[in-house]
Amino acid sequence: MKRENQQNEQLSCCALCQDVLKDPVSTSCGHWFCRQCISSYWDQSASSGDSSCPQCGERSRGRAGLQTANPSEWF
């Protein structure tokens, strides 16, 4: 049960700001972020042309590849 609670908490928190997801989006590798957080992260990395996942480093298709979902559907 504790492991399930940890999983739910991870899914409801942004890996960048560590807060509850706001306007959640998923990268092509399946990691979830606030839309604003991932956009800001990629904006800062734009000079290098990098649009990789901040969690695992997998190359993403950028903003066009972001998937949206309702967090209540996760549980």
Image: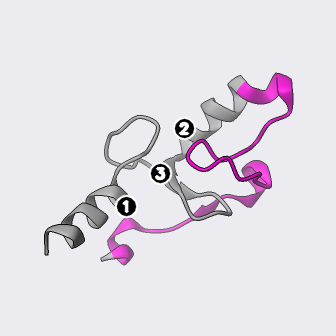
Say which amino acid is labelled 1. Answer: Leu
Distance between mark 1 and mark 3 Cα atoms: 13 Å
Rendered residue at 38%/77% (across/down): 73
Earlier in the chain: of badge 1 and badge 2, it is: 1
Question: Disc 1 on helix, strand or loop?
Answer: helix
Query: Which corner quadrant holds the N terminus?
Result: bottom left
Say which amino acid is labelled 3. Answer: Asp
Report x, y in % for residue 66.
67, 58
Q: Which residue is identified by label 2? A: 36
Residues 72 and 45: in front is 45
Indicate yes or no whether the magenta region holds residue 55.
Answer: yes
Magenta-tinted stretch: 45-74
Earlier in the chain: of badge 3 and badge 2, it is: 3
Question: Disc 2 on helix, strand or loop?
Answer: helix
Q: Which residue is identified by label 1? A: 11
Say which amino acid is labelled 2. Answer: Gln
Question: Position of 1 compared to 37: left or right?
Answer: left
Question: Position of 5 compared to 31: left or right?
Answer: left
